[in-house]
Image (cartoon, rainbow, N blue to C red):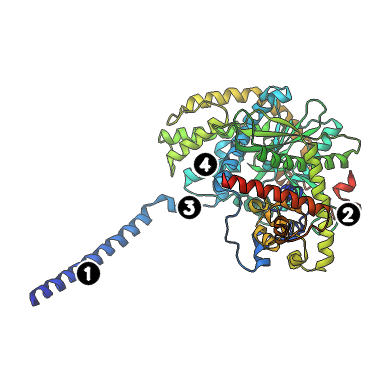
Amino acid sequence: MTVKGSTALVRLAGNPSCEILGAMVMQEGSEKRFYERIVGEPYDREFGERQSSKRRGTQFEQNVFAGDARLLREAFSPFLGIDADAIIVRNLFDDYPGTKDDSRVARLRITRGILADAVVGRPVPHIIVQPQLLLPTSPGPRPYFFIAPDVLVRSPVDGIYLPGDLKSFIVRENEVAKGDLARVRLQLGAQVLALMHEYHCIDPSITVGSNGMLIFSRPNGLNPHTPRVEDLGGAVEAIRIGITAFLRHRQRINELRAGAEPFTVAADLSPNFQDACLTTCVMAPWCRQRAAGQASDMGEIASEVLGNMSIQHVIGLMTGTIEPANDHERIVAIQLRELAAKHNTEQVA
Amino acid sequence: MSRSTDDIDHLKAQEADLERRLNEVRERRAELEKLTRPRGEKKGRPLRDITLDMLQEAHCPLNSLLLASVIRPLHGRSIPATRFGTLSNDEASSFESSRARPVYLCHCLTYDQGQAVKRFWARSDWPLADRIMGPMTGRILFLKGAAWTINLARLVSEEQITADNRDTLQYVAADQARDAGFPVQRTKFPYDEWLAMIAAALNKHEAEDRALREAAAAELEQQLSERDQLFGSRTGLVSLPGSRRSWRSTNDDR
């Protein structure tokens, strides 16, 4: 996983309390490099997206954008209410290809131009392929996140563009697993927020709805399914919380580091180890070590229920060797004893 | 005992002699192959010249992705994605230098602002209207590029021209036909059928697109310098967060 662009925001939204994540987002260079500089040895575990998934994703995009985005035009034709042949597409990768910052800035300028033209009623494309947006996070180091939706599609109702993301997951009947959907919705939430910002700069009175589109791949042939319009109110709010958390972490890290690189103050930051960290973050083993012997070592639900108790303390409460210090500990002790009794009974049976 | 030792020595000497002769034969073969291989000559040809020739043959602007995918089977050269970016910068620098060239590689321009569409390449000796991109021009240029590729594959299959890898070129042509939405069957390459379908598809939008491009060209010729007519109008700076005091965070903006 990366800690750049919308992925960084999705991760911050998923774990807003983790200051280590905040430092990773601030730090130049890769996530693995961040690990190596803190731990002092190379990261030797599995890392990143599977090559097969990457290839599938790339192939899906190539298929969909080929022939002046023929498949995309066909997929969006019912939504736009226009014949696929009459749909106008502009691929900003044709204008300015590349993934470096100067290419992104050039595409951002074109995207802003198209949005402004749309607002004043000039002719604009129905579909913008590979547009570029950004989310500012006030002046300072890393003052913005580049956000790149796969497409922007102009709503036939109010003329406002909606962000859309292509997903090459294998889905049947256009239904996707809950876990996968939560992540892509957060990604779309970041895109909606960035689009809101761009429209707000053009005209603050423009209302941008919290809607986005997901275009999944059909099981055979990597063709697009019918686009799904998603209500993203919750995801947008989660991304806002993630950004607020990042601003808070950034302020604390800046105070601690006094001009040095963010990774230098990692030991002074508070991690928030969660089960999900093990599959998404290179720092998970390091953070878990720091939580060793604490309830949080058993995952976020244990951490939520038991608070800052040590595992020894919890065992003491359960076996009765430690007296509960307050009502919370008393309830925990009763519940743990009930669970232990049930467990023992089941074992005997 | 001494007899068998003599035999071994004799065999070793024979083996060494054969190895020496085999090496001589290999070296000689390599030298002859170098002399007779036409690819060696082609590989040294600059990408600029190849691109100019291809554009001349196609009579229309071509997308750099298509150029790269055709150059590989036709000339046996793999072009990295970044190579066209370098070529673009070199060409603009060359135009600004004192040594004029008879023809430059240049980009298509957007019909409304005259900005470069970097993936679409053209020649400076073409009329400006042929290098303008209107709203539908992308589709028309895709179809024209597809027709050019399919025709190339047809000529190679008829042995009118040679290609480094004719099989791959056939599949590149078939990919173009599939991208255009035409039925494609494995190992079947109905070039004439595909070309007829492309001609029909082009008829739908070409006249309207041509009129728009000519009108835009007349305007842009008045507005843009000679340099900008080739490499696109220079755009203003983009204000990024942090570059002005007035920039606030997303959360402040809401």
- Pointer 1 local density, CA inside 10 Å: few below 14, some 14–19, many at least 20: few
Task: Name the N-terminal-most of marks 2 and 3.
Answer: 3
| Residue A69 x, y percent position in the rendering | 64, 33
The residue wearing badge 3 is B43
Q: Which element is circle 4 on?
A: helix
Q: Nearer the viewer, mark 3 or mark 4?
A: 4
Mark 3 belongs to chain: B
Q: Which disc is residue B244 wearing?
A: 2
- Chain under callout 1: B
Q: Quadrant of residue A196?
A: top right
Q: Secondary structure at mark 3?
A: helix
Label 3 and label 4 in one chain: yes
Asked whether residue B52 is in view, the answer is: no
Label 1: which residue? B16
Q: Separation of disc 1 and disc 4 at Cα? A: 48 Å
Instruction: Specify the amino acid type for callout 3.
Output: Lys
Residues beneath discs 3 and 1 located on the same chain: yes
The kind of residue tagged 4 is Val
Badge 2 amino acid: Arg
Judging by the rendered image, the residue that carries numbered circle 4 is: B70
Q: Residues within 10 Å of mark 2 (few under 14, many from 20)?
A: few
**Separation of residues labelled 2 and 3 (CA atoms):** 50 Å
Chain to which mark 2 belongs:
B
Q: Position of residue B161 (x, y in %)?
A: 44, 38
Q: Earlier in the sequence, mark 1 or mark 4?
A: 1
Judge by depth and name the residue closer to the eye, B67 or B106: B67
Q: Is residue A302 above or below residue B124?
A: below
Query: Is A318 or B12 nearer to us in this picture?
Result: A318
Label for residue A73?
none
